[in-house]
Amino acid sequence: MIARDGACVSLWQNTVTEFNKSNFFSDNSFDVAIVGGGITGITTALQLQKAGKKCIVFEAYNLCFGTTSGTTAHLNTLLDTPYTTIIKNFGKENAQLVAQSSKEAIELIKSIIKEYNIDCEFEDASAFLFAQDDKQNKELQDIHDACREVNVKAVYANELAVSIAHKKVMRVDGQGKFHPVKYVHALAKVFEDLGGVILQQCRVEDVDENDVINIVTEKGNFQAEFLIYATHIPPGVNLLHLRCAAYRSYAMAVTLKNKKYPGNLFYDMYDPYHYIRSQKIKNSTYLIVGAEDHKTGHVENTDECFLKLEAYVRKHFDVDEVVNKWSSQYFEPADALPYIGHLPGHKGNILVASGYGGNGMTYSHVAAVTLKSIILNEENPYIKLYDPNRIKPVAGFVSFLSHNADVVRMFAGKWFANEKLKELADMAPGEGRVVKYEGHTIALHKDESGGLHALNPTCTHMKCSVAWNNAEQTWDCPCHGARYNIEGYVVTGPANIQLEKIEIKNLAE
Ligand SMILES: Cc1cc2nc3c(=O)[nH]c(=O)nc-3n(C[C@H](O)[C@H](O)[C@H](O)COP(=O)(O)OP(=O)(O)OC[C@H]3O[C@@H](n4cnc5c(N)ncnc54)[C@H](O)[C@@H]3O)c2cc1C
């Protein structure tokens, strides 16, 4: 099993072992440094290494520690944001390019799997979007028409292979599904076979931007001509944080008594919607259902989201056993398209890929191709389409940045008595709460053995107050999605600095 950025165990992390091959290297200078070892980082690194660039990947934990092991890995050209919206925001021609780029992304995945003979349980699939009332019928018709306008061949279907009441069904072929972590691990091996370097357990702590970039990491300093933030959301304080909203979604892998696993991909049209598929892993098959999305840190009891999801799954399927349930975070872009290219407000050799919404399996490959074109100075229409600088900074943003960049350390030299804090902590083991005590606000967590952990709840990113996520046992920031474990260490950016620890002393000792 591999580690992930939450306490719940996903189907993917549970069915692989850690990636532990590592290339020897003697020179700390590289052409391209890639920060982040999820699907974006590894796919992009492989594309660039194949193109003759000398690349290094830095991963703060282990490969796929982030959302890549918390995904559900549908491979779509039928995107979460309907083409109706993309056409409205960007025009028909650009929407056609979006559809083309996602189609090419799936083709790229298939060609990589074929070229390197990768065993990641890939299967071709069709997507079925179904309406359940008259309003959804109308919306489905609009989506159908918009799909056809952008050359995504949508057709109406007569049947739905899942027994969920429906009025109208639309089918799109040419989709896919796979085991995302097996895929990324296989790509990482190919990348290293081609001479690339991967450093796991190596957080990038600071970056000195120059023609030659100096990268400060937990394992020393490195130099590179280009740096790519494949960190899902870039660290630091950036315009993109105001343009990407952090959301949490919930997923469940179950076995079925009747063994009737539907082969394709299914979506209802509620907001948030349910997404359904099955996955074969070795000799076992699982039904995977996801839903219950909400803004990060905006739901008090995240366990309830699993209860609602399980009730839905049991209502519609003949569940034998719930094998895994997990939740994970994604970043929704403000205007429906991801941000791939030059990081706003930074030198031209600092690149980023972010804001994928729920389509990062596909968009990661659009990012790999687009970022490669930027670095190799190739013409590519996706560079303009996905340019993060399509959004302009609002007046006063620079002073806002410097105002928010400093970290608050309020508890240096201060401690609290365990006995006193225990009086505040009328919580069950595994719970956390932000409490007020002696004029201070404290993020307090009681671990499974009753021990208390206290942190300064002020997020080190932009000073919002974190909220407890009981399902994943993390402190999550409702503003921009930074997340911390019970010891205060960053598990998800954009924060790059841990929460301040508050010392607790036992007066009786
Ligand atoms: C529940 C759920 C279901 C989803 N289902 C689908 C789906 O069906 N289809 C689809 O296309 N998309 C889906 N998505 C979205 C998709 O999973 C993500 O967009 C994608 O996994 C993002 O990959 P990534 O490599 O960009 O980021 P991540 O996988 O998050 O990787 C980023 C990595 O960067 C590392 N990192 C961060 N900061 C640093 C640092 N300073 N130094 C070094 N390393 C650092 C992290 O540890 C992490 O491993 C889903 C998302 C969720 C939440």
Image (spheres, grey):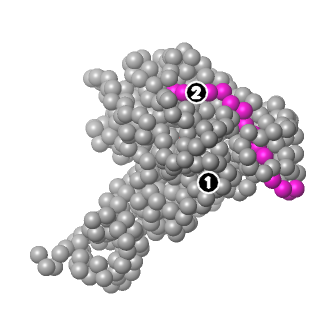
Q: Residue at x 67, y 51 (%)?
A: 316
Q: Position of residue 220 (x, y in %)?
A: 28, 38
| Residue annotated with mark 1 | 314
Q: Residue at x 54, y 58 (%)?
A: 306
Q: Residue at x 41, y 59 (%)?
A: 473
Q: Is residue 122 left or right of residue 36?
A: right
Q: Quadrant of the C terminus?
A: bottom left
Disc 1 + disc 2, Cβ < 8 Å: no
Q: Is residue 68 left or right of residue 152?
A: left
Find out whether residue 127 is within the magenta segment: yes
Q: Is residue 175 left or right of residue 310?
A: right
Mark 2: few, some, or many residues within 10 Å (few <14, many ≥20)?
A: some
Q: Is residue 420 visible?
A: yes
Q: Position of residue 246 (x, y in %)?
A: 56, 55
Q: Position of residue 330 (x, y in %)?
A: 56, 49
- Tell me the element at label 2: loop
Nearest to the observer: residue 198 or residue 124? 124
Tell me the tag on residue 257.
none
Give, as a three-letter code, the residue at label 2.
Answer: Phe
Mark 1: few, some, or many residues within 10 Å (few <14, many ≥20)?
A: some
C-alpha span from label 1 to label 2: 27 Å
| Residue annotated with mark 2 | 122
The span shown in magenta is 120-135
Which is more N-terminal, label 2 or label 1? 2
Give, as a three-letter code, the residue at label 1.
Answer: Arg
Q: Residue furthest left?
A: 509
Q: Is residue 381 left or right of residue 60?
A: right
Q: Position of residue 94 (x, y in %)?
A: 77, 36
